[in-house]
Amino acid sequence: MASDAIPVIDLGPYWSGAAGAKQRVADDVAWACENIGFLVISNHGVPQDLIDRAFSVSRDFFDLPAEDKSRFKPADGVAPRGYHALETLNLARTLGQVTPPDLREQFYVGPLAPRTGRGSDVPGAAVFYSENIWPEHPVAYREVFSEFYGVMEDLAARLMRIFATALALPETYFDDKIDHHFSTSPSNHYPVVANDPLPGQIRCGAHTDFGSLTILAFNDAPGGLQVLMPDGSWLAMGAGPGQLVVNLGDMMQRWTNDRWKSTVHRVVNPPIDRRRESRRQTIGYFLHPNYDAEIACLETCTGPDNPPKYPPIMAGEHMREKMERRVDG
């Protein structure tokens, strides 16, 4: 369960139409985004059966022999599609840290339909709008994750409307900045830690997320997510039945001129005496705005005594810089 320090916010009242309910939810979200950068949500609209099926088919894929999984790697080893093997990515590098590679493997799904037109033809954008790579086994993988991606895509868009309200912007402010997004949905597998890790090696190195927001579903086990709190301590967190974790990414922090926090987090190793029960899975949805969306200080987040802290940057350029740093070696 989430710690008392991480608020659990019921999204249901936002859509109820009750007087004042929308603003109360938005205010609660704003508090969490300003002070922690993480929150837990309930009544989000994602069916638990769908989450369970996504965990099941991804677990079946990760149980395949390494040579079978490797057939579904992206050609360049970097593109956010298909299979990325254990110890090939290193998220701590994105913060300039020198550590061994991460003890997790992943399978990435991106936008379901080929993207053409605005943004996708910008030089360098093609990789982010590339076709998905689908495994042959289990046969239900494509069907299940296509459904999962679509449902999470809808939730992310609704969350961005709540964010706009929380920032005193028109509710639809972000709609035209995410209507050509290049979001990804990785299934993350943390195998049982059988041997002693290298010095400084953990399941996922300390990092911030790259985009505007992240949604995370848990199938928990020992050795889990920790969030860096304002006092410098690490807080273990998860989510209860019917709950999902949401955190902000770097682009949202830039948009809000540091008012909202893109918080450092990591996934740690299990205690030695619990390694045998430490197999862990999570499935994320990372909302990355349109490639050509300008990430520039919002008008409600600046003023005479609070000038913009960051120069404007195109969302795709920011993403490319971050992704290139995370490749190990």
Image (cartoon, helix red, strand yellow):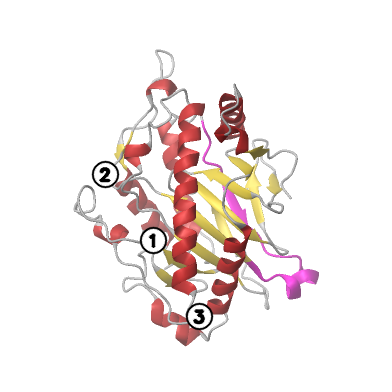
Q: CA distance from mark 2 to mark 1?
A: 17 Å
Q: Residues within 10 Å of mark 1 (few under 14, many from 20)?
A: many
Kindly state the secondary structure of the residue where label 3 is placed.
loop
Give the position of the C terminus as an image quadrant.
bottom left
Residue that numbered label 1 is attached to: 110
Residue span colored magenta? 260-280
Q: Secondary structure at mark 1?
A: loop
Q: CA distance from mark 2 to mark 3?
A: 35 Å
Report if residue 96 is visible in the image: no
- Tell which of 63 and 229 is nearer to you: 63
Q: Is residue 93 above or below residue 154?
A: below
Q: Is residue 23 left or right of residue 134?
A: right
Left or right for 185, reference 13: left
Image position of 5 (left or right of 75): right
Q: Earlier in the sequence, mark 1 or mark 3?
A: 1
Tag in front: 2 or 1 = 1
Residue type beneath disc 1: Gly
Residue 138: mark in rendering: 3
